[in-house]
Amino acid sequence: LNSQIELAKERGDLSAELVYSVRLGEVFEKRLNNVPKAIETYQAVLERDAKHKGALLSLARLHEKKGAKADAAKALETVLEGVSGDEAVQIALRLSDLYTALKDEAAVRRVLEVGLNANDRAPDVRKKLHALYEKQQAWAELAGLIKGDADVATEDGQKVQLYRKAAEIHLAK
């Protein structure tokens, strides 16, 4: 792999160089069980391309294994900036767990809202935001979330119940 990395450098093929470097990091991590060298390799990739998704995800995974939640979150935040849809939802949920462990409620809310914007029907994101909005007494946001639930409800009775609940929150809070 080192020779392939060098050949790619000589050709000026950054993409191939980074792909081979990430593979080298995987070899250090999985076959040689040399996590520090794997981390060093992934960080070298990020020095060349700060938004390289493969290196960021690998680095986040290794930091999570080590219990370095803040470092893992930093890498995943960068990934979250460049993804959308269901992938953004999954990264947002993973980040919310990290930020919950770090006791950073504002960051939990922010990443869950990013996940909701990526897919407004994601049930896990909606459930976590519902609980968080209640805890933070963010009544307008909670009512909006419940209204969104009502908008997609299939049964008329359920729709009425959810709209009523959203209205009660607006009136009472």
Image: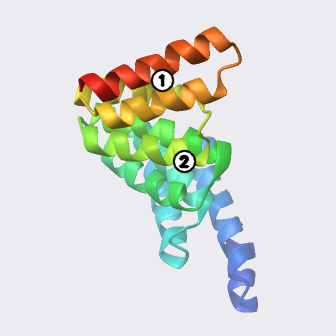
Element marked by disc 2:
helix
Judging by the rendered image, the residue that carries numbered circle 1 is: 127
Question: Looking at the picture, how far across and down is residue 18, in whole percent?
Answer: 65, 71
Residue at image position (28%, 34%) is: 138
Residue at image position (66%, 48%) is: 85
Q: Is residue 21 left or right of residue 127?
A: right
**Mark 1: which amino acid?**
Lys
Q: Quadrant of the N terminus?
A: bottom right
Question: Looking at the picture, how far across and down is residue 21, in whole percent?
Answer: 63, 66
Q: Evaluate if marks 2 and 1 touch, with contact meaning CB atoms under 8 Å apart.
A: no
Q: Is residue 58 above or below residue 67?
A: below
Labels 2 and 1: the sequence-earlier one: 2
Question: Looking at the picture, how far across and down is residue 126, in whole percent?
Answer: 50, 29
Judging by the rendered image, the residue that carries numbered circle 2 is: 117
Residue at image position (49%, 36%) is: 93
Q: Is residue 4 left or right of residue 73?
A: right
Q: 24 or 102, which is in the foreground? A: 102
The image quadrant that residue 141 belongs to is: top left
The structure's colour scheme is rainbow
Q: Is residue 88 above or below residue 160?
A: below
**Mark 2: which amino acid?**
Asn
Question: Looking at the picture, how far across and down is residue 113, in whole percent?
Answer: 44, 44
Q: 4 or 46, which is in the foreground? A: 46
Residue at image position (50%, 69%) is: 46
Q: Quadrant of the C terminus?
A: top left
The numbered mark at residue 114 is: none
User: How dense is the environment of label 2, judged by Cα within 10 Å: few (below 14), some, or many (20 and up)?
Assistant: some
> Separation of disc 2 and disc 1 at Cα?
14 Å
